[in-house]
Image (cartoon, grey):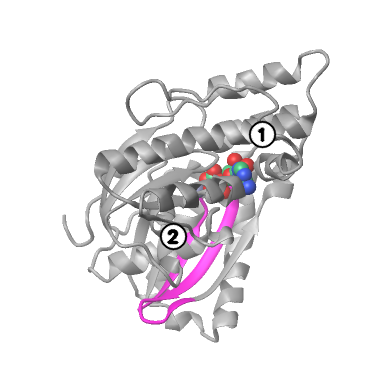
Amino acid sequence: MIVLGIESSCDETGVALYDSHRGLLAHEIHSQIDLHALYGGVVPELASRDHIRRLVPLTQQILHKAGLNRHDIQGVAFTAGPGLAGALMTGSLMARSLAYSLGCPAIGVHHMEGHLLAPMLEPETPDFPFVCLLVSGGHTLLVRVDAIGQYRVLGESIDDAAGEAFDKTAKVLGLPYPGGPHLAKLAQKGDPQAIKLPRPMLNRPGLDFSFSGLKTAAITELRATPPPASEDLAASFEAAVVDTLLAKCKRALQQEQLATLVISGGVGANQRLRKQADDMCEALGGRAFYPRLEFCTDNGAMIALVGALRLAENEQSALELSIRPRWSLDELKQPGSH
Ligand code: KG4
Ligand code: ZN
């Protein structure tokens, strides 16, 4: 089955064609970063308008790349939530209209399920069950994944998401938006032990995170006189976030008696996080898996993949335009079960 996947929940327009036999056929991502950079954050109305502009040409491009035409599409998957309501509407409307005109099924996909299963787009895939750390600009979640659609949220951030903390600290460092990758680059030149920063919530039981205090501590250090070297602050901040994330990952793996860890979401592109996660999993006798860098951030491929897996079980969404701007992962079911 050839499935078109459409991602439009935030500031990336992603489209992809996934074949249940041959795997990923083609994909394109258009990032709206430049559009929102002026405002220092995503402007929902501008995001929706840009998705509308991009969706049809990008879909034509991937069809061309894959040597297919639209009549080869046998199912359309779209991100139904969570995300910005207007932005979700654009993808949903496009998916619904296309599926209707082609006479094929459409299916609304949970954005986070896409991130959880994104490593399955790679040649070597993790076996179930595993623990997934989903770290993006909007979410910091630890999830136990037993099967497709069988998820249990083990812990989450009680305030800022890890990516949000990266971005806010980067902004104070004067780095461009979104600051996470810029801060990580600067950190490579600094000393991660130069400035003592807290590792929040480690002395408490449980698997929740909190990054707001750490961000404030870093910003307070920056405003001291004389201020620390920005490379050292960046390196010390990155080390504190990574240590905190991985201490909870280790706790989750031990609690669940598992040794396979998946790290997904935008912050999953962080090289320090990847290196330390590899070392930690190796020490536990297990292994860490990641999607390729371009599939750590939002993309259509992960949505097409989930759509193909669920459509294969005859699951599809009702005809009305259904989006879920707020939608918990715990509410999902295994494909085919109603
Ligand atoms: O998953 P994503 O593209 O979007 C959502 O938030 O859904 O994640 C974007 C987040 C941003 O906060 C960005 O600064 C962060 O991921 N990020 C990074 C790195 N690359 C992206 N944070 C730290 N280190 C990186 N290398
Ligand atoms: Zn995302």
At mark 2, the secondary structure is helix
Residue 96 appears in the rendering: no
Classified by dominant secondary structure, the portion drawn in magenta counts as strand
At mark 1, the secondary structure is loop
Residue closest to the eye, 82 or 194: 194
Residue closest to the eye, 256 or 182: 256
Name which residue type carries label 2.
Ala
- Residue labelled with disc 1: 192
- Residue labelled with disc 2: 118
- Report the span colored magenta: 1-24
Q: Is residue 167 magenta?
A: no
Q: Residue at x 65, y 55 (%)?
A: 31
Residue 183 appears in the rendering: yes
Q: Quadrant of residue 143?
A: top left
Q: Quadrant of residue 186?
A: top right
Residue closest to the eye, 184 or 309: 184
Q: Give residue 213's position: percent from left, percent from top.
A: 55, 19
* CB of mark 1 near ligand 1 (< 8 Å): no
Q: Residue at x 76, y 34 (%)?
A: 231
3D distance between C-alphas at marks 2 and 1:
30 Å
Q: Give residue 275's position: percent from left, percent from top.
A: 55, 50
Q: Give residue 162's position: percent from left, percent from top.
A: 53, 35
Label located before the other in sequence (2 or 1)? 2
Mark 1 nearby-residue class (10 Å; few <14, some 14–19, many ≥20): many
